Image (cartoon, rainbow, N blue to C red):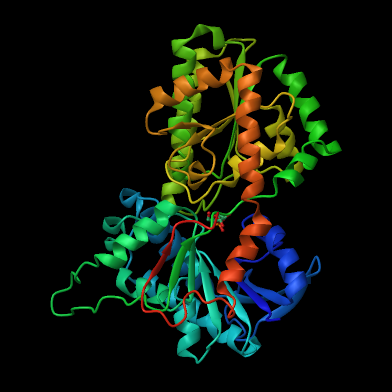
Amino acid sequence: MSRIIVVSNRTPGKGPAAGGLAVALRKTLAEREGFWFGWSGRLVDAPSPEARFEDIDGLSVAQIDLTREDHHAYYAGFSNSILWPSFHLRLDLATIEAHWYEGYRRVNTQFARALLPLLKPDDIIWVHDYHLIPLASELRNLGARNRIGFYLHIPFPTVDALYAIPHHQELMRDLSRYDLVGMQANRDVVAFTEFAEHQAPSTLAGSPLKSVDFGRTEVAAFPIGSDPDAFARLATSPAAIKMIRRMERALNDQQLILGVDRLDYSKGLPQRVEAYEKLLLNDSRFRRTVHLLQVAPPSRDTIKEYQQTSDELDAICGRVMGRFAEPDWQPLTYVKRAYGQPSLAGLYRLARVGLVTPLRDGMNLVAHEYIGAQDPADPGVLILSRFAGAAEIFEDAILVNPFDTDETAEALRMALDMDLEERQRRWQTLMTAARKHNVEDWAISFLDRLAPASTAGTGTRDILYLASVA
Ligand code: F6P
């Protein structure tokens, strides 16, 4: 059986980013053989061209170092100041510096040069996320003929947002050099299809670009999931129970509304707190009887727009406190730090409401984890943004438009007033959906589709737009 080579910017054990993915792919890698390839987390003056192998909790991981300058242009620059805001439809928050693209490509070339000597001809390569869109092109330019798949963890942009990205035509051509491109949601496949069918002419006079031919590339939605039963077990583990007891003492019968998000402008945190403010304003029953806990670990904090989001959140939380707090009651707690999975599982289980309201999100695994952690006898209610990929799966959540804070405030009221029978009915449907879209099946279905035995993507000149892997 072919080996599986997983490639991502972060590697397992080097930070929270690859954590969930690592759990999902650990089993697959153990069964199929292979290794994980990515950035070591180290910045050096002169990186070795060769990757170093390391055993991380039984997983074989090959890593390379980067220069500080390249890493800045590739990660903070092109990936997170251009691609991230554009793909999340926040062009107002994009900063475009032309030289970042060269750094982005240089790092992708460096990845390809270090990976190529490690490959066997029948290895299957699975590349993850927007940092590495050009990797298949770079590998193929060096002669790799392997099957290569790409999975986009964030939403695919609308065509206008895509056209605002410098070198978007080259990036799309890079995507066309993969055999399989996986997206989170059907809406992403639809947006991709729109680009593929109506490619705009180049905006640079005198350099007309040919349209991109996606004839070899299959594009389909593979909604990622979690392991909801593992989360259910975690939520009754000693560490989770310790957190539950600690919070119960602090809450003293107040109902907990919980948000857990990286501190990122795509997560809609100011709008969320504003909706909570409206709940307290509209309905005095909830003053003293509810408490909002927002966990928001800082993220990408060298980037100006992330610092501004943090300041904005400080200001709005301060405003709500000033408006509603009393000497013996505080309406909210805002924690800017990360917690381990067991503590989070405890918080999810205790929360009467899981408030997951990103302005736009690839999938949002907090929604999956919140569902997994609930007590079947007394489950909480999920309020979910209709602009998260998860909304295509969890129709029995209370779906809201996160930009409409009146609607979110009303959803909060509904959730807090919801009777046990309806909470149980909704949760059962949600848990069934979370189990159906579990992360292990996600990895298997993507790899099955990418495997050479698969007929998809070979020999046809048509683009295959597949609605869903369900
Ligand atoms: O959602 C996209 C993503 O890259 C995730 O894979 C990751 O968990 C998150 O963003 C954090 O990213 P970073 O590596 O920039 O901290």
Instruction: Please state the horizontal and vertical placement of residue 48, each as a whole percent of the image.
Output: 62, 84
Front-lying residue, 367 or 207: 367
Residue at coordinates 29% horizontally, 58% vertically from top-left? Answer: 159
Q: Is residue 81 left or right of residue 212?
A: right
Please identify the quarter of the rendering in which residue 212 is found: bottom left
58 relative position to 94: left or right: right
Q: Quadrant of residue 231?
A: top right
Q: Where is 140 relative to 188, above or below? A: below
Q: Residue at x 48, y 40 (%)?
A: 310
Using the rendered view, name the quadrant where residue 39 is placed: bottom right
Q: Quarter for ligand 1?
A: bottom right
318, 55: nearer the viewer:
55
Quadrant of the image containing the N terminus? bottom right
- The image shows residue 364, relative to residue 165, as above or below, that is above
- From the viewer's perspective, is 439 left or right of 99? right
**Residue that lies at the very extreme toward the top in this rendered image:** 284
